[in-house]
Image (cartoon, grey):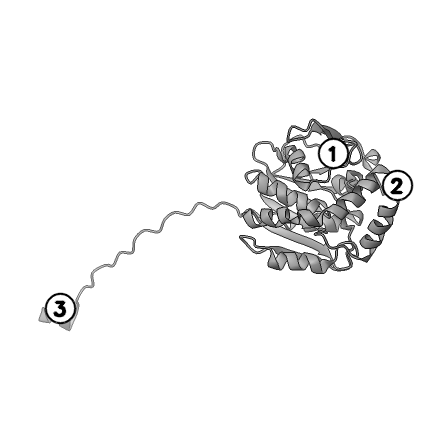
Amino acid sequence: MPTSDDYPDSIVRRFRFEAGGGFGWKISALTTPRQKPAPWKIVVVTGAPSWAEYWAPALAALPQHREMVVVDRPGYAGSEPVEYVGDIQVQAQALAPLLHTRPGQRVLLVGQSYGAAIASIMAEQNPRRVAGLVLLSGYFGEAGPTARWLVRLGSKLLKIIPRDLRHAVLEVSGQPAQLGGLHAALARLRIPVHVIHGDKDDFAPIEIAERLALQAPTRRPIRFQRVAGGNHFISDGPAEPLLAALEACIPVRKPFRLRWPKPPAFAWPRLRIGRDAARA
């Protein structure tokens, strides 16, 4: 797949920012430079392993009236620290600076796979900065057959596999005990929440995502979108269907129309004519 190196710096650009929460880490991310602020900024919190490079084609195909930022989460790729960061609450605090906007912008926050729970907590912790939440191929503690096999194998090879794969195995293994934070966050959110999931996902079964969408104690119903034939890595496919699915999560602003108030109804008195008038 193309990476950010395959595109000019004016289309896809890598940058670094200081993590929130006072942790002192430098976090690496990819973005779409824009001369003027776009009305909507799409912020993507990636899964495990957390590699923003997989989103490079989608970033390059993004229309000019949108912005996108895709992050390498703490402990992955070009982001600090070198050590494993297993607490999803800590990760949410560290990634909060991604939600900063320019005047007039709104944020659509996308949590992919393992990043879905982190994005939910970010949205709950920053209610005035997030206008919509998307859980894309969300992983919610119950793995499909392929993920179970990979985690089981990786757990036996932790000492020899690369750092990012080791951190991914540790994250997935330690997530179920932290899902209380996800459900608490969803219960407090007032913004629209969307779940997008492929029906061929053998890493995070679609049945788990559907159950979450139906049973989560949210203030408003969660919108569920089934992607026919989609696997766990929807972002690895053609960019256009992915961007169309995300665009469908952005509300359409109706044009403003100035309507003058209607004047009160006035009834003219009836005139009596003919025989009735003569009698009068």
Q: Are marks 1 and 3 in contact (CB under 8 Å)?
A: no
Residue 265: quarter of image: bottom left
Mark 1 vs mark 3, CA separation in Å: 88 Å
Amino acid type at image mark 1:
Ala
The quadrant the N terminus occupies is top right
- The residue sitting at the bottom extreme is 275
Residue 221 x/y as whole percent: 57, 56
The image quadrant that residue 143 belongs to is bottom right
Mark drawn on residue 161: 2
Q: Is residue 19 visible?
A: yes
Q: Secondary structure at mark 1?
A: strand
* Amino acid on which the number 2 mark rests in the picture: Ile
Residues under labels 1 and 2: Cα distance? Answer: 24 Å
**Disc 3 residue type?**
Ala
Residue 77 vs residue 256: left or right?
A: right
Residue 38 locus on image (x, y percent) = 63, 36
Percent of width and height locating residue 204: 75, 54
Screen quadrant of the C terminus? bottom left
Q: Decide which of 120, 159 is in the foreground and name it.
A: 159
Residue at image coords 72%, 51%? 139
Which of discs 1 and 2 lies nearer the camera? The answer is: 2
Instruction: Check disc 3 and report the residue beneath it.
Output: 277
Give whichever of 149, 69 is nearer the camera.
Answer: 149
| Foreground label between 1 and 3 | 1
Q: What secondary structure is found at the residue carrying circle 2?
A: loop
Which circle's residue, 1 or 2, is located before the other in the chain?
1
Disc 3 crowd rating (10 Å Cα; few below 14, some 14-19, many 20+) is few
The residue that disc 1 covers is: 29
Disc 1 + disc 2, Cβ < 8 Å: no
